[in-house]
Amino acid sequence: MRNVLRDESGRTLVIALVALALGMLLVTGFLYYVSTSQLATRASSEQTVDHYSTDAGVEHALWKLTHNGYSTTTLESGLPVTDTIDINGQTVTITVTKVTP
């Protein structure tokens, strides 16, 4: 019985340390992946809000153009008309300029 115990001395510690090292490598890689994924999701969400805000600003300018919201004399002068509105918690600046053919 003593020979069996002597042959196994230290093997369990080595196996446990190797398993712990592999576990740390796996957890570190997983945490890095989660962190990167969260940053990418946040950036994508911000881009979506920016896109919708810009689109809403264009729609607002088109509505004002069709409903005489902008002075015709100002547009006829060729000077740009600037309008600022708040959409989705963002300030959107709209510039309308008459294009001459």
Image (cartoon, grey):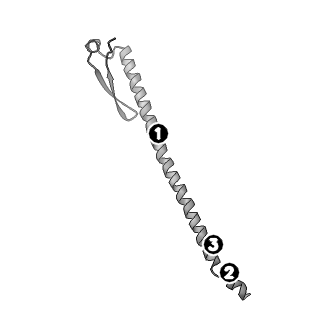
Disc 1 from disc 2: Cα separation: 56 Å
In this figure, which residue is indicated by the disc labeled 1?
Answer: 45
Element under label 1?
helix
Q: Give the amino acid type for the residue marked by disc 2 in the picture.
A: Glu
The residue depicted at 34 percent of the width and 14 percent of the height is: 68
In this figure, which residue is indicated by the disc labeled 2?
Answer: 8
Instruction: Give the percent coordinates (x, y) of residue 82.
Output: 29, 24
Front one among 76 and 17: 17
Label whose residue precedes the other's in the sequence (1 or 2): 2
**On-image quarter of the C terminus:** top left
In this figure, which residue is indicated by the disc labeled 3?
Answer: 15
The residue depicted at 29 percent of the width and 14 percent of the height is: 75
**Which of the 4 image quadrants contains residue 3?**
bottom right
Number of the front mark, 1 or 3? 3
Disc 3 from disc 2: Cα separation: 11 Å
The residue depicted at 29 percent of the width and 20 percent of the height is: 81
